[in-house]
Image: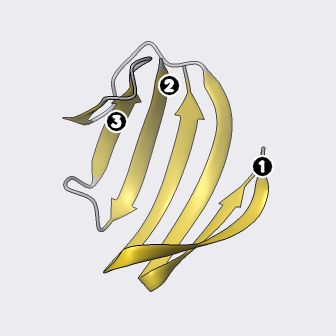
Amino acid sequence: MKKYIEIGIGNTWLIRTEIEHEDGTETEMRGIVKPFKLKSVYLRVWIRRRVLILDLREGIKVQAKSKSNFKIIIGFYGV
């Protein structure tokens, strides 16, 4: 099970935790859900259909998305 704690604008809540289950389903909850063991920190900037991700573990990535949005998020990946 992976956990993503995200803080920023553009999501449903200012601070949220997204849990990705083993079967591929996702659950989104308001606030920070513990316990949490940190694996990586990332910055995600989503402008229109482009997403820039700066990740301490995986480096720099640019993605194209099908929907247009605006988000600026600092995220914490862990288990």
Residue 49 sits above or below residue 32 on the image = below
Q: Mark 2, mark 3: which one is toward the viewer? A: 2
Kindly give the residue lying farthest to the bottom in the view shown: 48
Q: Nearer the viewer, residue 48 or 8?
A: 48
Whether the residues at callouts 1 and 3 have beta carbons within 8 Å, the answer is no
**Whole-percent x, y for residue 68 in the image:** 32, 82
Please name the residue shown 59% across and 18% down the image.
Answer: 37
Q: Secondary structure at mark 1?
A: loop
Coloring applied to the structure: secondary structure
**Whole-percent x, y for residue 33 in the image:** 33, 23
Q: Which mark is residue 2?
A: 2
Please name the residue shown 27% across and 59% down the image.
Answer: 11
Q: Disc 3 marks which residue?
A: 17
**Label 3 crowd (10 A; few <14 / some 14-19 / many >=20):** many
**Label 1 crowd (10 A; few <14 / some 14-19 / many >=20):** few
Please name the residue shown 30% across and 47% down the image.
Answer: 15
Whether the residues at callouts 2 and 1 have beta carbons within 8 Å, the answer is no
**Whole-percent x, y for residue 71 in the image:** 38, 72
Q: Which mark is residue 58?
A: 1
Residue 14 sits above or below residue 65 on the image = above
Name the amino acid type tagged 2.
Lys
